[in-house]
Amino acid sequence: MNLFKIPISLINKLHWLCAQFWWGGDPEKKRMHWCTWENLCVHKADGGMGFRDLSKIGSWEDTFIYHDGWLPRDGVFKISSPRVLGIFDKVSSLITASGLWDSSLIRASFHPDEAEAILSFPLPRRKLPDSFLWHYDKSGHYTVCSKYWLATKRKSVPSSSTSFHTSWWKKFWRLRIPPKIRIFLWKAYYNWIPSLVNLAKHGTLESLKVLCDSSARFKLPPQCDLKEFLLTANDCLSLENLEFLCVLLWRIWFRRNKWIHEQTWLDDESWANNPWQAPTFGWVKVNSNAAWCSKQKKFGLGTIIRDFTGKVLGSVATPISSSVFVAVAESWALERGAALAKQLSFSEVVLESDCLAVTKTLDLITVIASEINYVFDSIYEICSDFHLYKFSNTQRIGNQVAHNLARLALSLENEKIWLMGIPESINHFVIVDMQQLSSS
């Protein structure tokens, strides 16, 4: 089979078709392209959209501590600390007979950063064979997409090249908001939305005119910059409030367009309401969530169990010092909830989380070649003792109690369990769920 290099003319044509589609292209109409193709191809963490530029192209018993690359981190996967253990020692020698990391041996044998990375790595409940994983994809499998990202090494948009802006973009793309809202705010951040001012700058309008004198009071002052507003909000607001602000900004723009272009005024009484749903008769629902504190390098896990009437049957808040992927922490929270349900002898259980990546993968009962597979294996093992079980996904609004339990866990030193109850500070969120349940 022969391979041929794609002609530049064909590549440019494909780029043009992608850009036409992205900016709402129509064969009959010409659409405005608010930025260059190169800007669209910049990695999302640096303020672009991450489009592809087609012109670029177990059990640790078999893994050696110093010879093999087994530490999951960017860059070098092999241990860089000076060798103090045996040259042929296996990673399994760092694990105690009870199946936990030997923290004292690890802290004495490795640099602090490597020791923390090892201790934060989840261990399986039972022995699994060692296998090769591709670190740059969450599935653990090699993909062209992840290799492309590794090869391009993140080109930067000039206005977002600092670490400050990179930190904002990393957080922005992880917000739990609909994709259409992310795309709107990405455009608004760079001032690439079709406002009257921007249309006039691009020569689309012959002159800039205010629609009517009464609308002048709605104009933002010249010094108001949405980019700076979002960056300031990122510093001042909690993750939950920042997500709400993003949805609110999109909703304002959406209602404005409906009024200007269709003369339709929208009522906003129930647009953001998606409350907690009780399980069916005879079942219990386990809601779980994980919260992260970057300053403490610590996760808080929160779990609550309720029956079909909304009655609280048990809750737990668990602090964990670790810096793993968020999906791994969300899986830990789900595992802790399943373990609590088993401890309380429930037999028909709904395991619910607002992390779609976790619940969707668990529902498929598939094998993921990554560190999260150890947690999934543990969840399946616990669930095998239930008579019936299923996984469910909900939005953050339907997972408020577990979310606030996770935030409470960040302030704890050790795990706390409340049987047939809930902490007083969280009781308000339970009451809200009960009120919404009775009114539905």
Image (spheres, rainbow, N blue to C red):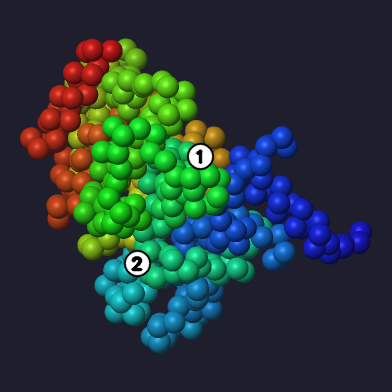
- Viewer-side residue, 400 vs 389: 400
Packing grade of label 2 (10 A; few <14, some 14-19, many >=20) is: few
Q: Amino acid at mark 1?
A: Thr
Is 238 placed left or right of 368 in the picture?
left
- Mark 2: which secondary structure? helix
Q: Which mark is residue 361?
A: 1
- Asked which quadrant contains residue 164, the reply is bottom left
Q: Residue at x 35, y 56 (%)?
A: 227
Q: Quadrant of residue 159?
A: bottom left
Identify the residue shown where x is 44% and y is 82%: 80
For the question of whether residue 402 can be seen, the reply is yes
Estimate the x, y position of residue 260 in percent, counting from the top left. 43, 29
- Residue in the picture at 59% in, 46% down: 32
Figure quadrant of the N terminus: bottom right
Q: How far is mark 1 from mark 2, CA to CA? A: 33 Å
Density class for disc 1 (Cα within 10 Å; few <14, some 14-19, many ≥20) is some
Total number of numbered labels? Answer: 2
Instruction: Name the residue tied to disc 2.
Output: 164
Q: Is residue 261 left or right of residue 204?
A: left
Quadrant containing the C terminus is top left
Q: Nearer the viewer, residue 201 or 315?
A: 201
Q: Is residue 244 left or right of residue 21?
A: left
Report the residue at 40% width, 87% height from top: 82
Nearer the observer, 385 or 140: 140
Vertical side of 304 occupied by 64: above or below? below
Percent x, y for residue 71?
Answer: 46, 69
Which kind of residue does numbered mark 2 sit on?
Answer: Phe
Q: From the viewer's perspective, is residue 423 above or below residue 415?
A: above
Instruction: Mark 1 and mark 2 in contact? Answer it, CB < 8 Å.
Output: no
View extreme (left): residue: 424
